[in-house]
Amino acid sequence: MVAKGARSDHNLVHLLPVYKPLVQREPVVTVKKWTAETEEALKECFSTTLWEELCDPYEEDIDGLTHCITDYVNFCVKNTVPTKTVRCFLQQQALD
């Protein structure tokens, strides 16, 4: 470190690396693990749903009803099925 006001014969330069390690360049994928237990839990979720309460407000609006049911199914899947984030490498074997 050079004292303030002192003369120096060199400049301090901060360089940022351009190279990114292979691990940081590979894509990240989220996968869901479907098992018999998660399937049963999802069936339980759907069997306890009050479908009349969910569907009645839409009456003849098929687009609104479709959107509502799709959102509800996705909500149940998100809360029931465990997900795992993995990196995909070129030499990696397929997931089981």
Image (cartoon, rainbow, N blue to C red):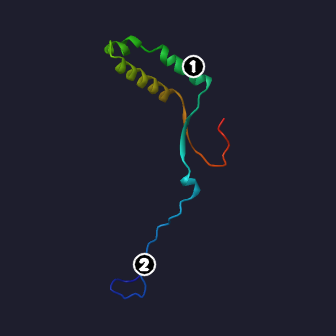
Query: Mark 2: which amino acid?
Result: Leu
> Where's residue 95, x and y in %?
65, 38
Nearest to the observer: residue 95 or residue 36: 95
- Tell me the residue that label 2 is attached to: 12
At a point 32% along the width and 86% down the height, the residue shown is 5
Q: Which label sits on residue 71?
A: none
- Horizontal relation, residue 85 to residue 57: left or right: right
On residue 40, which mark appears? 1
With 94 as the anchor, is 6 left or right in this view? left
Look at label 1 and name its amino acid.
Glu
Give above or below for 21 relative to 90: below
Q: CA distance from mark 1 to mark 2?
A: 63 Å
Q: Where's residue 8, x and y in %? A: 40, 87
Residue 85, quarter of picture: top right
Residue that appears at 44% across and 72% down: 14
Looking at the rendered image, the quarter that the C terminus falls into is top right
Q: Secondary structure at mark 2?
A: loop
> At 57% from the left edge and 19% from the top edge, which residue is drawn?
40
Q: Is residue 21 above or below residue 46?
A: below
Position of 88 compared to 64: left or right?
right
Neighbours of disc 1 within 10 Å: few (<14), some (14-19), many (20+): few
Residue at position x 68%, y 43% from top?
93
Quadrant in the picture for residue 31: top right
What kind of element bears circle 1?
A: helix
Counting from the top left corner in percent of width and height, residue 78 is at 48, 29
Looking at the image, tell me whether mark 1 or mark 2 is earlier in sequence order: 2
